[in-house]
Image (cartoon, rainbow, N blue to C red):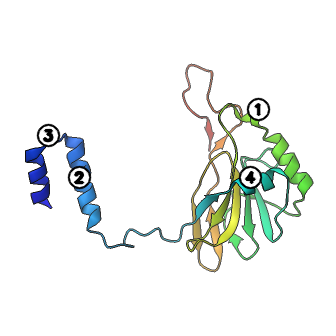
Amino acid sequence: MSLIIKIYKEETPVNEATHKLLLVIAAISFFPPGCAGSGNYGTFQRDRDFDKMFLSYQVLPDYKYYTSGGYDKPNAILGIHRDYQLVSELWQSIPDVDSTQIKKWISTIDPEDRGSGHSYFASYILDPEGKQVGFWYSIQKFTVVKFLDENKIEVYTPDLIQPGDEFSSDGNRVGPIILR
């Protein structure tokens, strides 16, 4: 490895950042596949048809519904298949969700509320093997989804950015306003 870098350095001018990048790439290549692994983390799968289904206020049977950021105007809507248990004190469980409730949520998180260029995303939540186990609807495109023992799932809530406050007009504040 050092011979390759030495030859490369002699033949081509390389700045320090490029040299460090080459070292990192060389070091990573020595890890056997799977060593770095993704562990028991889920992934998101965007689906335009799911976006359309969600925006037509369809309720998915066999899913438990949760909200984050408030019941009346949620920052995220989460659905977890009934075969799994959500482990979190930050999500509010919403029993007996119907299409009227979904319509109310969608209408209160109206695109004009969110500012130009910001939109909510509907994504399926997949387990480490790629099986669909839930869904996510939020202005935040992703979050951490951990799969624990005994079909338990931990899903991080999104940052609580208040709609309309994504960027402050106050010259003393810069960036998003995040409530913790």
Mark found first going from the N terminus, 3 or 4: 3
Q: Quadrant of residue 113?
A: top right
Mark found first going from the N terminus, 1 or 3: 3
Q: Quadrant of residue 31?
A: bottom left
SS for dot 4:
helix
Q: Position of residue 122 (x, y in %)?
A: 70, 53
Which residue has dot 4 on it? 51
The mark lying in front, picked from 2 and 3, is 3
Amino acid type at circle 1 is Glu
SS for dot 1:
helix
Q: Quadrant of residue 151?
A: bottom right
Which residue has dot 2 on it? 22
Mark found first going from the N terminus, 1 or 2: 2
Mark found first going from the N terminus, 4 or 1: 4
Which residue has dot 3 on it? 13
Mark found first going from the N terminus, 2 or 4: 2
Q: Position of residue 64 (x, y in %)?
A: 79, 66
Which residue has dot 1 on it? 112
Q: Position of residue 148 (x, y in %)?
A: 58, 74
Residue 45 seen anywhere in this rendered image of the structure: yes
Amino acid type at circle 3 is Pro
Q: Residues within 10 Å of mark 3 (few under 14, many from 20)?
A: few
Q: Are marks 2 and 3 in contact (CB under 8 Å)?
A: no
